[in-house]
Image: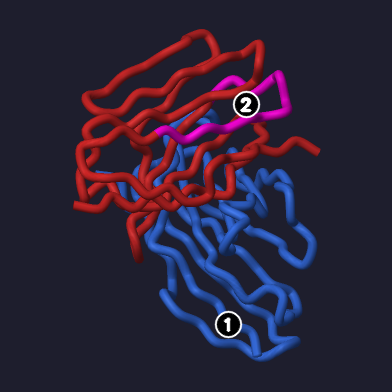
Amino acid sequence: GENVEQHPSTLSVQEGDSAVIKCTYSDSASNYFPWYKQELGKRPQLIIDIRSNVGEKKDQRIAVTLNKTAKHFSLHITETQPEDSAVYFCAAIMTTDSWGKFQFGAGTQVVVTP
Amino acid sequence: DVKVTQSSRYLVKRTGEKVFLECVQDMDHENMFWYRQDPGLGLRLIYFSYDVKMKEKGDIPEGYSVSREKKERFSLILESASTNQTSMYLCASSVLAGGEQYFGPGTRLTVT
């Protein structure tokens, strides 16, 4: 079946450096690509998302890029700060009005060291 | 502010017991989801409901069933709990099926 591969599984960066997480999906019908951040002991929360008709989206220090031809999308975090330390999940979602397929990546543990 | 609550944060059950996990959202969301979260496997969808009494199987429905009698409440049922169902269970809701999901705090279930 469909799946989403997420790399790397762990990422250690110095404060102020950039972090990049990459995801590859298999279902070309996927049309919605969210990224969730889960801090230790807390629930996942959406940080940014992109739809299949857009190639790039940016929100302050975070950005997402989508390459539909290659079926991969990436999360970019610039000027990392200690509060960026968390597990990040990507997802590839294909939906109609009342049905959907939801595939999450395995997660990336990001550690930002001061 | 969307609020998604789950009936228990921690639960310990014995093998063979019937287990009910409940999720309630207060934002009139059409869509509700049950996931399990295991280390190295991310979030895996168990069931999805897009309307009252409507449900769709996710990737790992075996051993689980769901009930959605009211819009705000989505229950996950383990018919006969087994040790391989020990996991963190997360409920979520969303306005659009393809939109932001709001997660509950999770229930850590241990089956002994």
Q: Which chain is red?
A: A
Residue A29, magenta (yes or no): yes
Percent position (x, y) of residue B12? 55, 87
Res A76 seen here: yes
Q: Secondary structure under badge 1?
A: strand
The colour of chain B is: blue
Numbered disc 1: what chain? B
- Quadrant location of the C terminus of chain B in the rendered image: bottom right
Closest to the observer: B67 or B97? B97
Which residue is painted at 74% across and 80% down in the image? B82
Percent position (x, y) of residue A28? 71, 19
**Dot 1 corresponds to which residue?**
B110
When the figure is inspected, residue A45 is found, relative to residue B111, above or below; the finding is above
- Quadrant location of the N terminus of chain B in the rendered image: top left
Classify residue A69 as left or right of residue B16. left
Numbered disc 2: what chain? A
Q: Callout 2, which amino acid?
A: Thr
Tags 2 and 1 touching, CB below 8 Å? no
Q: Which residues are magenta?
A: A20-32
Which residue is painted at 53% across and 68% down in the image? B88
Classify residue B103 as left or right of residue A114. right
- 2 or 1: mark nearer the eye: 1
Percent position (x, y) of residue B103? 42, 51
Closest to the observer: B24 or A103? A103
Q: Residue A20 falls in which quadrant of the image?
A: top left
So how many labels did they put on this image?
Answer: 2
Percent position (x, y) of residue A112? 28, 50
Classify residue B69 as left or right of residue B99. right
Res A96 seen here: no
Mark 2, other Cα within 10 Å: few <14 / some 14–19 / many ≥20 = some
**Dot 2 corresponds to which residue?**
A95
